[in-house]
């Protein structure tokens, strides 16, 4: 993993989420919904979620051009997390995003309200 000193957004923006991360949050993800995982990376996240029993759409396509599934669950590239959150709110789409906790301190997350 990159440290602050050697982080390069052009090469260090896509990190593969380990399967244990999805296992850790699976109880918070609705089982009866179609889960969209729009940020493809290497494709392993969709496979991991399917192995956990979720009905997953995980395709290598542009998130901003396609609105799939009932709920978005993913680890978006951090450099576009603001745009992702804004688009999900605009679509009125329920979501669970893996982002740094400090994201909640940014003004742009105020659109989420208290929910």
Image: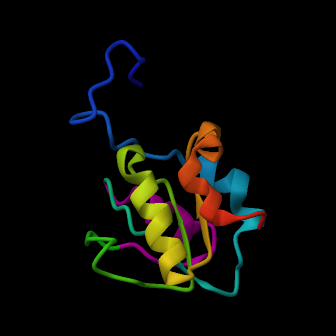
Decide whether residue 6 is among the magenta residues. Answer: no
Provide residue 66's location: percent of width, then percent of height. Answer: 32, 82
Q: Is residue 23 left or right of residue 108?
A: right
Q: Residue furthest left?
A: 10
Provide residue 84's location: percent of width, then percent of height. Answer: 43, 62
| Nearer the observer, 4 or 2 | 4
Provide residue 37's location: percent of width, then percent of height. Answer: 46, 69
In the image, is residue 17 above or below residue 32? Answer: above
| Nearer the observer, 85 or 21 | 85
Q: Is residue 95 left or right of residue 16?
A: right
Q: Quadrant of the C terminus?
A: bottom right
Q: Quadrant of the N terminus?
A: top left
Q: Quadrant of residue 93?
A: bottom right
Q: For the magenta stretch, what is the residue range? A: 42-58
Can residue 102 be seen here? The reply is: yes
Can residue 76 be seen here? The reply is: no
Residue drawn 67% across and 55% down? 23
Decide whether residue 57 is among the magenta residues. Answer: yes
Q: Quadrant of residue 38?
A: bottom left
Q: Quadrant of residue 97?
A: bottom right
Residue drawn 35% across and 60% down? 43
């Amino acid at each position: 993993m990159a440290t602050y000193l050697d982080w390069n957004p052009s090469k260090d923006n896509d990190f593969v989420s380990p399967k244990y991360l999805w296992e850790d949050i699976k109880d918070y993800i609705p089982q009866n919904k179609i889960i969209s995982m729009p940020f493809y990376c290497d494709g392993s996240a969709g496979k991991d979620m399917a192995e956990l029993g979720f009905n997953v759409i995980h395709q290598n396509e542009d998130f901003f051009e396609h609105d799939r599934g009932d709920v978005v669950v993913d680890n978006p590239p951090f450099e576009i997390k603001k745009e992702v959150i804004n688009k999900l709110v605009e679509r009125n789409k329920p979501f669970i995003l893996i982002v740094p906790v400090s994201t909640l301190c940014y003004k742009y997350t105020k659109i989420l309200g208290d929910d």
